[in-house]
Amino acid sequence: MKFLSTGKPQGLLKILIFGIVSLFVGFGLAITPANADSVGEEFPDAVTGNVRVEGEPVAGVGISLTGEGYSAATVTDDRGRYFIGVPVRGVYSVTIDESTLPSTELGVEGGATQEVEFGLSDRVVKNFFIGAGVINQISMVDQIISRVVYGINFGLMLGLAAVGLSLVFGTTGLSNFAHGEMVTFGAVATFLIVSTGAPIWIAIPLGVALSAGFGWTLDAGLWRPVRKKGLGIVQLMIISIGLSLFLRYVIQFFVGGATEQLPGFDSPKVPLFGAVALSVTDLFSMGLSIAVIGLFAFWLLKTKTGKATRAISDNPDLAAASGIDVDRVIRIVWVIAAAMAGLSGVLWAYFRPGIKWDMGTQILLLIFAAVVLGGLGTAFGALLGALIVGILIETSGLLIPADLKYVAALVVLIVVLLVRPQGLLGRKQRVG
Amino acid sequence: MDWGSILNNTIAAFLTPTTIAFALAALGLAMHFGFAGLLNFGIAGFMAIGGYGYAISVLTFGLPWWAGMMVGVVGSILFAIVLGLPTLRLRGDYLAIVTIAAAEIARLMFLTTAFTDVTGSADGLFGFNTRQDGTGFQNSNPFPSGDYGFGPLSFNHQTLWVLTFGIAILGLCLWLLWALMRSPWGRVIKGIREDEDAVRALGKNVFAYKMQALIIGGVFGGLGGIVFAAFSNVSPGVFVTSLTFFIWTSLLLGGAATILGPVIGAIIFWVLQAFLSNFLSQLALSGILPVSTTQASTLRFVLVGLGLMLLVIYRPQGIFGDKRELTFVK
C-alpha cells in the first residue's frame, strides 16, 4: 500500500491526474477517491490541515507524509485543505512542497518538513500558514502597550471590588467568599432597572445604590448577629461560602442561565494611539473607576469615619476603647464595600461583555489574588494588587495560551503568599 | 404528585458511585480539617488529579486499570506535597485561599486547549473503563452480565462492579482513618489542631505531621476522583470550586471530627438532593409551586447554601459530632 509522489507536477490538472493515477496504481483497484485532496480515506485516522498564504487558501500545493513505514502524498483543494489517511496513529513528518507555492520567496515558518504526533483523537491537524497575517503586522511594542492599557482597564474594575473585600477583611477578619455575588448583584440590579425602560445613566447609580442597600442588609441581617454570637474566623468564612452558594442560585432562580446585555455594550472602538483602540464604554469605565477610587481614597484618608476604619483595621480593641463605635463603622464599611463591588459588577458586565448569574464567581479568585498581592486588609495595597493582576492577565496572553491567562494570576497569588505573605503593602506581624 | 417515583429516586441516591466518591472525598477533608485543622478548599483539585491521572495513564500510556489508578494516587500524593511544602507554615485562612487557587489552576490546566491531545480539553476524557485489549476496569468485572438488586436499588453488572470496588476502597480508608486516629500519631495530629505551639514545645515536628495528614487526606480525595472516573468520564466541568463546597457541606453535615460522619454526611447530602430535585420538580409540574422546573432544580442549591450557613451557625460540630471536639478553633 504505497504511493509516492516523485515528480514535480507543474499545474493543477497534472496534479489531479497524477494523484488519481497513482491511487489506481497504488491500490491496484478501481477506487475513485472522493476528493482529489484526500488520500487514504479508508483508514480511521488521518492528518488534515489548511495551507494559506497571507490568509488566503491556496490550491494545488503538494503535501507529502512519511512515517511509521508508510508514505503518501496529496495536493490541497480549492479551499486550501488536504486530508491524508494513515494506517496507524504515530509520529509522521509532513512536508510541504515549496516549489508548488505561488511564490518561491515565501519561507515556511518552522521549515518545510514538520512533525505531527497523534494524541487521543483520530485526527491531527497540521496547518501551514505562510507569509505575514494582518495581526502580526502590529509590532511587539505596540501589542504590549495596548495589552497594558486593557490590563489597566481590567485592573481598575478589579480594584473597585478588591478594595471593599480588603476593607471588610481588615475590620472584621472575614475572608468573604460571597464578595463575587455582591459583584453580580450590582450588574443584575442595573440590568433589572434597565429592563423597566429606564435609561442607563439612571440605572447605574440606582443599581449601585441598591448594592449599597444590599450591603447594609447583609450586615444587619447576617454578619452583625454572627459577630455578636462570637463565631471564629473559620466559621465566618464557611458561612460566607454558604451565603455565596445561596445568593448565586437565588440570582440564577430569578434571571435564569442566559447571558443578558446592558445597552451600549457593543459601542464601536475608537483608535487612540499606536495599536490602542478603546470603546466609549471602556473610556467611560476607566474614568468612572478612577473618580470613584479617588473619592474613596479621600474618604479613607481625610474623613473621621475613614480614620476610624483604619484604626479598627489596626487594632479593633484599642479602637473600641478609644470611643470608636466599631459596629457603626463596620456597617459603613459593608455599605461602601457593597456599593463599590456593585459598580465593579456593572463595569465587569461591559468588560466581559454580558450579565450572567455566575459572573462574579468567575473573578472572585482574581479579586482575592489582588487583595493578597497588595496585602490583606490594606485598601491601597488591594488597588495596587488589582492593577498588577489586571495588567499581568492581559499581557500574559502574549506568551501563554489565552485560556490559561487566569492561571498566571493564580500562580502569582501563590508565589506571593510564599515569598511575602504580608503582601506588597502589608506589615509583617499580620501573618502568624 | 407521584410519591412513588419520588421515593424510588430518593432511595436510589442512597447507594451510587457518586455518593461513594463524595464520601471518600469528605473522608479526606475529615483528615485535613476535622483532625489536623488544615483548611483545605482544594479537595476538587485532588479529585481531578486522581481521576485524570487514572484516565490519562490508561488512554495515553496504555497502562492497565489498576496501574492507572496507582498513578492517580501517586498524582494526588505529589499534589499534596507540592501544595504542602510551601503553604503549611501559613495561617489557616491563607491556606484556604492557596488551596482553592491551586485546585482552580489544576482544573484550568485540564481545561486549556493547549493539551487537548492528552486531556481532551473541555470535552474531558471517556472510554477508559472498557478497553479493547482487555486491560480496562470493566474488563476485569467479575459479575456476569445482567441486573442485580431489587426495587429502587437495582444496578446493572457494570454499576455493581463500580459499587463493589468503591465500597471496598471506602471501607479500607475508613479502617485506616479509624486506626490512625486511635494511634499515638492521631493524638499528635489532634494536638496540632488544638494547639500547634504546645505540640511543638513537646519536641514534635509539626510540619512533618501536617504534611503526612495532608498526603493521607489527599489520597482519600484522589481515590474519590478515581471512583468517580471509574463510573463515568472525567471532565473539567465536574471538578469546579462548587464541588469542593458541596463536599464541605457533606463533611460538616455529618461532623468534621468523626470517622463515620463524613460518609453519613455524603449519603444525607445526596439523598436530600435527590429528594428535593424530584419533590420540587413535581411541585412545579403540578402547579403547587408557581415556578418552572428549571427554577425548581435551582431551588435545591439555594437550600444547600442556606443549609450550610445554618449548620455552621447553629450546629458547627455536625449531626454526629461531639461539641467538645469542635474543630473551629478560634
Image (cartoon, rainbow, N blue to C red):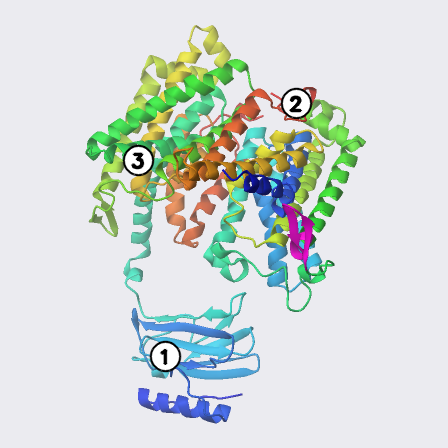
- Report the disc number at residue B326: 2
Q: Give neighbour class at mark 3: few <14, some 14-19, many 20+ (Cα, 10 Å).
A: many
* Residue at the image point whose x is 25% and y is 43% from the top: A265
Q: Are marks 1 and 3 in contact (CB under 8 Å)?
A: no
Residue where numbered disc 3 is placed: A346
Do circles 1 and 3 both sit on a common chain? yes
* Residue at the image point whose x is 72% and y is 60% from the top: B144
- The residues tagged by marks 2 and 1 sit, at their Cα atoms, a distance apart of 70 Å
Q: Is residue A6 visible?
A: no
Q: Amino acid at mark 3?
A: Val
In the shown orientation, is residue A116 left or right of residue A129? Answer: right
In the shown orientation, is residue A347 left or right of residue B5? Answer: left
- The residues tagged by marks 1 and 3 sit, at their Cα atoms, a distance apart of 49 Å
Quarter of the image where one finds residue A192: top left
Instruction: Give B175 or A177, whichever is nearer the viewer.
Output: B175
List x then y, in percent, for residue A107: 36, 74
Q: Chain under label 2?
A: B
Residue where numbered disc 1 is placed: A76
- The residues tagged by marks 3 and 2 sit, at their Cα atoms, a distance apart of 41 Å
Q: Is residue A323 above or below residue A130?
A: above
Q: Amino acid at mark 2?
A: Leu
Look at discs 2 and 1 and give the one toward the viewer.
2
Q: Is residue B155 magenta?
A: yes
Quarter of the image where one finds residue A215: top left
List x then y, in percent, for residue A370: 43, 35
Q: Secondary structure at mark 1?
A: loop
Q: Is residue A427 above or below residue A114?
A: above
Instruction: Give B172 or B327, whichever is nearer the viewer.
Output: B172
Query: What span is colored magenta in the figure?
Result: B146-160
List x then y, in percent, for residue A247: 43, 31
